[in-house]
Image (cartoon, rainbow, N blue to C red):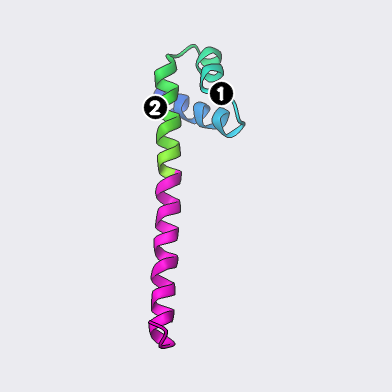
Amino acid sequence: MSKMAELAMEIDDLIEQGMTVKFIAAKLGIPFQMVQDEFDNRENLELEKQYEYLSYADECANDDAQYYGEA
């Protein structure tokens, strides 16, 4: 595994533990912006998942409404 991949995994672990971006940057000795970017990417992925689940739920609700004649 590359050094960058290992670093990304370590950043993810620390984020999951609830550490702040500033703390992670200081602990790992890396630029603040690098950690912030990783944090933002992780947050965006989570939002995309939530949107996908909600879209699927809406689609299922619409299908049910059509099936039961409510639409």
Viewer-proximal residue among 2 and 17: 17
Residue 69 locus on image (x, y percent): 40, 88
> Which residues make up the magenta segment?
46-71
Q: Amino acid at mark 2?
A: Asp
Looking at the image, is 22 positioned above or below residue 50?
above
Judged left or right of residue 21, residue 49 is left
Looking at the image, is 31 positioned above or below residue 36?
above
Element at label 1:
loop
Element at label 2:
helix
> Image quadrant of residue 59?
bottom left
Of the residues under marks 2 and 1, which one precedes in the sequence?
1
> Image quadrant of residue 65?
bottom left
Mark 2 nearby-residue class (10 Å; few <14, some 14–19, many ≥20): few
Viewer-proximal residue among 56 and 7: 56
- Residue marked by disc 1: 20
Q: Residue at x 40, y 57 (%)?
A: 52
Q: Is residue 1 visible?
A: no
Residue 48 locus on image (x, y percent): 39, 48
36 magenta-colored: no
Q: Residue at x 53, y 12 (%)?
A: 26
Q: Mark on residue 9?
A: none
Q: Amino acid at mark 1?
A: Thr
Residue 71 locus on image (x, y percent): 37, 82
Residue 21 locus on image (x, y percent): 51, 22
Q: Mark on residue 37?
A: 2
Judged left or right of residue 25, residue 58 is left
> Image quadrant of residue 20?
top right
Q: Residue at x 39, y 78 (%)?
A: 63
